[in-house]
Amino acid sequence: MAIRSIHITGSPVLHTRANEVDVFDRQLSKLVRDMYQTMDEAPGVGLAAPQIGVGLRVFVYDYEDADGNPVRGELINPQLEVGPISEEPASTETEVEGCLSVPGERFALKRADWVRVTGVDLKKRPVTIEATGWLARIFQHEFDHLEGTLYVDRLAEPYATQAAKVISARGWGQAGVSWLPGVDNLED
Ligand code: ZN
C-alpha cells in the first residue's frame, strides 16, 4: 500500500470527466487500497480517484450514518440520484464543505438532503445506499469529482469570489500542484 499525492485544483485530471472502470484486476485493487490509505492519512471522509491523478470512476468514503454506525466502502462506476436542493442560502454553520483538493479551505454550499447511490464494489457486487444529511453531502461531493466538478465550482456568491481569490493567492489553479498526506501539513 502507498499513500499517494493529492492533486490540487488546477490539475487537469480534477476538471475532466473520469472514465468507467472496465477491468477489475489487481491493479484496481491496489488503487482502491491506496485510496483508503490516503484518505485515512489526510484525513478525509471521502476520496475520488481523480484526486490522486487517476481518471477512473472510483471513490471511497468513511463516515457514520445518522445512527452513529460506521459506513465505509468503495463505489465503482456509481450513479447518483439526487433529491431536491433548497433555494435557501447555505448555512455558514451547518453546511460548510471542504475538499482535499482545495486543502485547508471551507465554504458554505447548499446540497440535496437525500441521495441514492448505486454502483459496484471491488468484487463487482452491487451496492445501493440511500443517505441523508452529511453522508448525502459526501456522496454528492465525491460523485462530482468523477464528473470533473469541484465543490468550489458550485459555490454561490460571495463564496465563489472568495474561493477564486484564495485559490489564486495560494498559487493553485494550475497544473502540477499537489500535497502528500503525512508529509505536507495541509490537512483539510
Ligand atoms: Zn473533494
Image (spheres, rainbow, N blue to C red):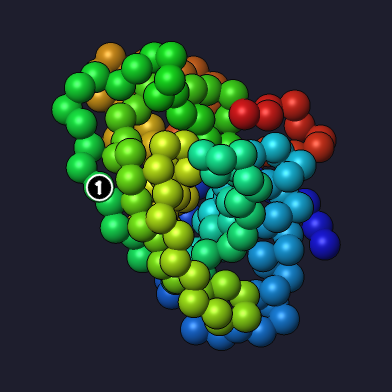
What residue is shown at x 72% (from left), y 49% (from top)?
38
Query: Is disc 1's CB within 8 Å of ligand 1?
Result: no
In the picture, the quarter occupied by the C terminus is top right
Q: Residue at x 43, y 14 (%)?
A: 93
Vertical arrangement, residue 120 with respect to residue 12, above or below: below
Instruction: Give residue 151's position: percent from left, percent from top.
Output: 39, 37
- Residue 13 in the figure: left or right of residue 115: right
Q: Identify whether 134 is placed above or below 143.
A: above
Amino acid type, callout 1? Gly
- The image quarter in which residue 27 lies: bottom right
**Residue 148 image position (x, y, % from top left):** 38, 53
Task: Residue at 40% x, 60% y: name it.
Answer: 117
Nearest to the observer: residue 107 or residue 85: 85
- For the residue pair 119 and 169, the one nearer the viewer reads as 119
Q: Which residue is mark 1?
A: 83
Q: Residue at x 45, y 70 (%)?
A: 119
